[in-house]
Image (tube, rainbow, N blue to C red):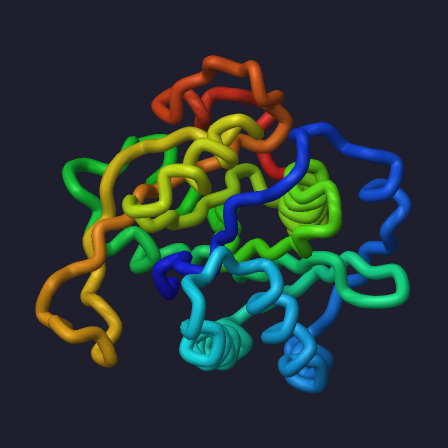
Amino acid sequence: MTPASGQQPPHGDGGSSSAADALRLRRLNRWQAETIKEDLADLYVESAWARPGEGYRGREAFLRRLAGAVRRPGFALLVAEDTAFAGCVYGSPVRREGTWWRGFDGSLPRSIEQLTASGHVFAITETLVHPHTDGKGLAHRLQRRLLADHHASLGATLVDQADPAVREAFLSWGWQDIGLVRRPSDQQSPRPSDPVVLRALVLPLGLGPDSEAHPDGLAHENRTQRPG
């Protein structure tokens, strides 16, 4: 999985507004995603908290990430729209051999290893929302819907450690921080040998934002088991 540099700190007051609820959610396959990639890149630029003058570079980086993501088995993308795109989320299932977790610092919780090996984990690669929407409510709705569509028992994502606002937003929705992941940096960076430090977050499906369940107990929670 590409480091989730595209995860954007949501805007809004944190509630699911009627405006966000009224948006239509639509699933797209990889071919459909290819046809609208320029529109999605525009959404990325509008959603990103980019520094002045970095819009083009960020847009190109997003298109590279999307191009890599659509080639992964099981890729799925969900958009929220009315007259234009208001948000999107995409990702793919975590492969059973667990390579998605490479670079994890320490021992991966056994329950997560078990869910990965059984094919019950889905990785969210990128979440975008337009700043004119209720960002927190819409982003949460998109994520939950994409995970539910794939009957996932556990959602997973990587967030750049340098983006604490993104991490805090995810934690407020019930995601849990399970540790650090170190990945090779983009070869376009000034110092490509320096690894990117990411936070690994997981979302146990069926557990609300106030749940205090620890990842070590996920494999024993009936609520997190994949429907038959």
Q: How many marks?
A: 0
Q: Position of residue 86 (x, y in %)?
A: 75, 58
Q: Residue at x 81, y 55 (%)?
A: 25
Q: Is residue 203 left or right of residue 191?
A: right
Determine which quarter of the picture holds residue 44: bottom right
Q: Quadrant of residue 91?
A: bottom right
| 104 relative position to 222: left or right | left
In the picture provided, is 199 more to the left or to the right than 170? Answer: left
Question: Is residue 164 shown above or below 213?
Answer: below
Residue 83, relative to residue 124: is it above or below? Answer: below
The answer to whether any part of residue 114 appears in the image is: no
> Residue 72 location in percent, x, y?
49, 73
Taking the spot 18% from the left edge, 36% from the top edge, the residue there is 107
Q: Which image quarter is the N terminus in?
A: bottom left
Query: In percent of the image, x 82 and y 60: which residue is there?
Result: 81
| Front in this rendered view, residue 30 or 188 | 188
**Going by the image, does 62 lie left or right of 223?**
left
Q: Is residue 24 above or below residue 15?
A: below
The answer to whether residue 215 is visible is yes
Residue at x 43% of width, y 38% of height: 165
Residue 164, x across and y down, in percent: 36, 38
Quarter containing the C terminus:
top right
Return the residue found at the far front: 52
Provide residue 56's location: percent of width, then percent of height.
Answer: 47, 80
Q: Nearest the camera: 135 or 141?
A: 135
Q: Nearer the viewer, residue 222 or 182?
A: 182
